[in-house]
Image: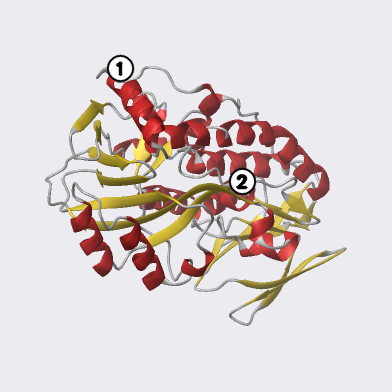
């Protein structure tokens, strides 16, 4: 049960009520910290239950300090995948280089984590489920702000009023659209599209990724362990986002199949698996860039506010750090002052990590024959030992200590 009031001296005052839309990574992390600072928290999620599965994610640098302060770091270390090898292949399938993944990601062996997204989601949910209210299989329909709070109607038919509302509902945030307008205003397309799905591990891969490249095209198979399945990725350059395909899985399959129709290596088998995949996820590679992350009593966090794209490897890190900074900024301040402090304290870190996308794209997805040749020459010169130093952007923010207000 969630307490709805707290003592102050000899009297009892109501706890401020807040709603978080989205129970992925940023949402439960924000719920944890807001509850710590005395808020009565409700989380609404359109899925019928916490979402499992998903592509593995990275937790590095400042984000490690967040999960350490949450008390879930030991559980996450137990779930660490320990990816050991990343092999790049030529267009004809010949090997370019086989390296430790940290050479590309900027991770630090023995410190940084790579875990299944579902394992992180489970850990966050377990850390907060007994202290906050979760409402699954529902979502926000409308938001109406007034001087006393935010009146929310839910698609399930309910109506409630909250002191504040937070959008933690991902890159294609409905909360952001409601407050700030169409996604196109804030989505910065990075020139690629991708499809991910699972398929049989026919190559017997273990704790490794194998990536095939041709100019403007890449195919990868990612084995998180010794499982019978691998994660498949097909990425390709495209002049503009294929808007017509985003809501049509069959159009997505047709587009990807046409782009890779003449590709070699294991790609024909990947395309065959794509046709039958029941977990296909297709999207554009892009970033969300906004001049501000709040409006009135509503604020955005994680991908909804500043998705960096998977090219940075920092989507999860920004979600965790942003949730910590947002909740802490509200610990002892009203919403207007707190939201301003959240942006002031977090934006430079976000901008620095979004800037990693250029490096990630140049390494993973060279778009021209010359860029691919130059990339391959760089890879051949890297050697086989793991990297020992992280990228400065990962740890560029030192977490402040926040104390609860009254």
Nearest the viewer among 322 and 393 is 393
Residue 74 seen in the current view: no
Taking the spot 55% from the left edge, 44% from the top edge, the residue there is 319
In front here: 395 or 214?
A: 214
Q: Can you tell which mark lies on residue 194?
A: none
Q: Is residue 158 visible?
A: yes
Q: Residue at x 46, y 67 (%)?
A: 245
Relative horizontal placement of residue 35, taking residue 342 as reference (left or right): left
Q: Residues within 10 Å of mark 1 (few under 14, many from 20)?
A: few
Q: Quadrant of residue 13?
A: bottom right
Q: Is 335 displayed left or right of 202 in the figure? A: right
Residue at label 2? 306
* Above or below, 363 relative to 268: above
Report x, y in % for residue 272.
21, 63
In front of the other: 287 or 55 = 287
How far apart marks 1 and 2 lie (CA) works out to 34 Å
- Quadrant containing the C terminus is top right
| Mark 2, secondary structure of its residue | helix
Residue 123, image x, y percentages: 41, 48
Q: Is residue 27 above or below residue 324?
A: below
295 lies above or below 252: above
* Horizontal relation, residue 202 to residue 168: left or right: left
Residue at the image position 51 percent from the left and 30 percent from the top: 65
Tell me the quarter of the image containing the N terminus.
Answer: bottom right
Q: Residues within 10 Å of mark 2 (few under 14, many from 20)?
A: many
Nearer-N-terminus badge (1/2)? 2
User: Residue 81: x, y in percent?
Assistant: 28, 39
On the image, numbered disc 1 is attached to which residue? 381
Q: Quadrant of residue 151?
A: bottom right
Q: Nearer the viewer, residue 33 or 116?
A: 116
């Amino acid at each position: 049960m969630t307490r709805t009031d707290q003592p102050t001296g000899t009297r009892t005052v109501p706890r401020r009520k807040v709603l978080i839309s989205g129970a992925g990574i940023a949402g439960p992390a924000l719920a944890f910290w807001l509850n710590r600072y005395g808020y009565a928290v409700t989380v609404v999620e359109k899925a019928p239950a916490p979402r499992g599965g998903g592509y593995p994610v990275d937790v590095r640098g400042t984000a490690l300090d967040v999960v350490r302060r949450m008390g879930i770091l030991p559980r996450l270390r137990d779930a660490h995948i320990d990816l050991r090898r990343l092999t790049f292949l030529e267009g004809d399938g010949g090997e370019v280089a086989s390296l430790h993944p940290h050479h590309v990601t900027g991770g630090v062996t023995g410190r940084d984590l790579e875990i299944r997204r579902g394992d992180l989601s489970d850990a966050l949910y377990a850390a907060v489920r007994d202290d906050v209210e979760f409402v699954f299989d529902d979502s926000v329909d409308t938001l109406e702000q007034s001087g006393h709070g935010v009146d929310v109607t839910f698609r399930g038919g309910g109506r409630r009023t909250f002191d504040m509302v937070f959008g933690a509902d991902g890159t294609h945030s409905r909360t952001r659209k409601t407050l700030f307008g169409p996604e196109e205003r804030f989505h910065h397309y990075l020139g690629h599209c991708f499809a991910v799905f699972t398929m049989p591990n026919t190559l017997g891969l273990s704790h490794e990724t194998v990536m095939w490249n041709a100019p403007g095209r890449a195919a990868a198979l990612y084995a998180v362990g010794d499982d019978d399945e691998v994660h498949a990725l097909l990425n390709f350059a495209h002049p503009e986002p294929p808007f017509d395909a985003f809501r049509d899985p069959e159009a997505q399959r047709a587009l990807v199949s046409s782009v890779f129709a003449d590709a070699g290596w294991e790609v024909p088998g990947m395309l065959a698996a794509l046709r039958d995949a029941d977990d296909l996820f297709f999207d554009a590679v892009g970033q969300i860039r906004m001049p501000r992350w709040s409006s009135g009593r509503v604020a955005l966090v994680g991908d909804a506010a500043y998705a960096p794209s998977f090219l940075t490897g920092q989507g999860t890190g920004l979600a965790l750090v942003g949730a910590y900074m947002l909740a802490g900024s509200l610990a002892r301040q009203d919403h207007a002052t707190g939201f301003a402090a959240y942006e002031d304290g977090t934006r430079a870190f976000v901008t620095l990590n979004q800037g990693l996308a250029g490096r990630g794209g140049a390494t993973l997805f060279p778009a021209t024959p010359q860029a691919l040749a130059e990339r391959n020459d760089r890879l051949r010169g890297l050697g086989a030992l793991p990297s020992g130093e992280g990228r400065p952007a990962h740890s560029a923010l030192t977490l402040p200590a926040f104390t609860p207000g009254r």
